[in-house]
Amino acid sequence: MRQEIRIAGFGGQGVIKAGVLLATAAMLEKKHCTHFPSYGAEMRGGTANCSVILSDSEIASPIIANPDTVIAMNEPSLDKFEPRIKKGGLLIYNSSLISKKPSRSDVEILAVPANKIAEELKSPKSANMVVMGAYIAKTGVVKLESVKSSLPTVFPGKEKFLSVNKKALDKGSKLVNG
């Protein structure tokens, strides 16, 4: 198993933390992983993004040219990273903030109303956890319980938000698993 993921959005949408959470869950499961953050020029409309690689074997480089999966939290991220997805890959996009439809017909597409669900949970900052729940349910690359167990490590001192983040992960998962 090897899965290359690009998570992208505006600075402040928690895309870097989502990547750290995914990598931490993989480490809990004794998988090999890399996390490579990239901070763009957010003040000029750029994107923050991270690359995560999860594998059963050693990883030679954290650089991803053509990911298996792209998670796009905003329209600029969709525009930038949709063309790079491997044929047959997966595109998950935040349909709460992205009004246009993705253009690729050679990848699987999953629209997730992440901000809408996060607002229903009265936790707008948990939109990243909604998409992570959907991604985990769709791919099974790590167990949802491993992700939940990783929350206190990734968000130290934020214990009051653990419950709502777990609910957001579950809501995202249920979009895929019903």
Image: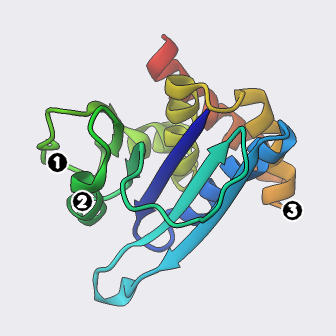
Residue 124: % across, % down: 51, 53
Q: Earlier in the sequence, mark 1 or mark 3?
A: 1
In the drawing, what numbered circle is on residue 156?
A: 3
- Given contact means CB atoms under 8 Å apart, are the residues at marks 2 and 1 in contact? yes
Q: Position of residue 112 (x, y in %)?
A: 37, 35
- Of labels 2 and 1, earlier in sequence is 2
| Marker disc for residue 75 | 2
Q: Where is mark 1, residue-wise?
A: 99
What residue sits 45% from the left and 55% below the top?
6
**Element under label 3?**
loop
Residue located farthest toward the top when viewing the structure as drawn:
178
Q: Does residue 20 appear in the picture of this structure?
A: no
- Regarding mark 2 in the picture, which secondary structure is present there? helix
* Residue shown at 60% from the left, 25% from the top: 140
Q: Residue at x 42, y 43 (%)?
A: 69
What x and y, as percent, mark residue 100? Answer: 12, 47
Q: Earlier in the sequence, mark 2 or mark 3?
A: 2
Q: Nearer the viewer, residue 30 or 39?
A: 30
